[in-house]
Image (tube, grey):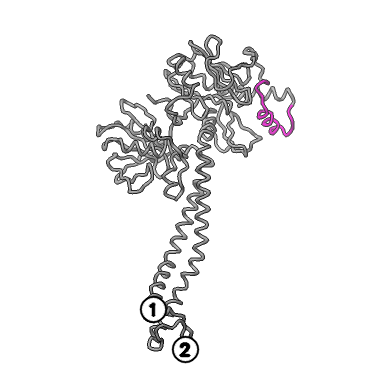
Amino acid sequence: MEGIDIHMALREAGVLIGARLGKAQEVGGVLFLRFFAPRGALALDPLGKGIHLTELRPPAPLRPPAFAAAVRKHLRGQRLLSLEQAGFDRLVRLRFPGGEILADFRPRKGNLLLLQGGRVVAATGKEEIAPADWGMADPLQGAGPGVRRALAARLGRSPTQEELLSFLGELLSCDPRGYLYRTEGGPVASFYPRDDLGEPRETFPHFHQALDRVLEENLFLGEARAYMAAIREAIRRKRRALERIRGERERAASWRELKEKADLILTRLDQIPRGKERVLVPGYDGRPVELTLDPALSPLEYAQGLYRRARKLRRALEELPKRERRLREEIAELEDLLRELQHRPYLAPYLEGELFRLGVSSPRQERAVDRERPRPREFVVEGFRILVGRSARENESLVRKAHPRDLWFHARGVPGAHVIVKCAGRPVPLEVMREAARLAAWHSRARHDTKVAVSYTEVRHLHKPRGAPPGAFVLREEEVMVVRPEGEDGRDT
């Protein structure tokens, strides 16, 4: 993010000033600060060099890294007093009564520092702070190469200093929206239209929503890349299998020759002595035909063996088109999943079941402690606990530990989270059910659709097929609710 991007992101994040810090979590090098009264969250990304409001809830490690642990220890429960930027520079200060967090995005590798009384208590990088002018407010300081390229693309030439200042004033006076672009270097979020990047792939009402999409893809990019490599390998295997089918079809087509040879042997059985390897017999047209035989078998046994081989090859020839069609369908599905992961890496944790079904080995290497202690998201709505799985294995554990009369929700026909409303047969208000359905839609491939169909039923109506992958269940009964996907908005306990 450039200085002016940070300025606009902080403008949106200002709604959290006065909120109390509830949790500090570090995932993939990104610090998530979760607040209450009012609820909301901030993402501080030293590697991506950005800060913004966030609705993301990636699975956090069971033990927080050192910096997140230090923030919890010194600042938990304290109010956020201010969010300050050093002019338009890439340096941000979050002030609390008991200390402050500095987000320094100026170095090649960004840095987060926790200070108390001006002393560095903890840092994600070097415990050094370069000088900064907190009073300077020159917009030109926040104009990085992205702003200059955007203006140059609009003008068709390099802008003058006066034109750049005028453009910056225009940007600062607008309400930030979200624009998501796809570039060779990856996704790019902007709060204004970037003429230099072409048409946006997606637009959002708020800047932080586009920033969330970029951060989400980056957080899950490593896992998604491992899946994509496994998918490409599976596609190669299935294409080789298709090539083998062509050869098998040619071999299987010889079943007629084998049957005709067996027919001729039986027809001329009295003319074929036992123990011969080759014999000449009259064909059906009267011309001599040379037959090869197995001296160890009688002519009758040999003919019967030919019939068996012919029947087997004929069955194979009938099955080959089905195998070929199935392979082509699986390749098409895998290619769709590959494209899906390229654009939506955050779906990686939910695809384990689908990929298992398509013969793709899972690249996920989960620690034993994580397998033993799945940690689903938890919300409380009108006194009802709502649990949301964040991977195929968490989904599996949620269902297995649920009461048979708890309600289960899942976006219909797409990979996503299993959502459980803990009710044990009690009547559940419609609004609680809608909230669970919205969470199921949000944590699914259909997250960015306008409307999503969500299946729901009691847990007792779910069946686990023998040999099915983690998180894969079959519904014996279901009802469907159509909702608009919505983010979590800090509704967790």
Instruction: State the mark number for residue 297.
Output: 1
Instruction: State the mark number for residue 348.
Output: none
Task: Choose between 321 and 194: the one closer to the eye.
Answer: 321
Question: For residue 417, what is the image quadrant?
Answer: top left
What secondary structure is found at the residue carrying circle 1? loop
Tell me the magenta residue range: 140-159
Question: From this viewpoint, is residue 150 visible?
Answer: yes
Q: Quadrant of the C terminus?
A: top left
Residue drawn at x 46%, y 59% as measured from the top left: 325
Q: CA distance from mark 1 to mark 2?
A: 27 Å
Question: From this viewpoint, is residue 484 visible?
Answer: no
Residue drawn at x 43%, y 19% as measured from the top left: 22
- 19 over 240 or under it: above or below: above
- Dominant secondary-structure state across the stretch colored magenta: helix
Give the percent coordinates (x, y) of residue 326.
Answer: 45, 57
Task: Choose between 440 and 125: the one closer to the eye.
Answer: 125
Give the percent coordinates (x, y) of residue 473.
Answer: 34, 44
Q: Closer to the observer: label 1 or label 2?
A: 1
| Tag 2 residue | 285
Q: Is residue 155 magenta?
A: yes
- 227 over 245 or under it: above or below: above
Q: Residue furthest top?
A: 117
Pointer 1 or 2: first along the chain? 2
Q: Quadrant of the N terminus?
A: top right
Q: Residues within 10 Å of mark 2 (few under 14, many from 20)?
A: few
The amino acid pointed to by label 2 is Asp
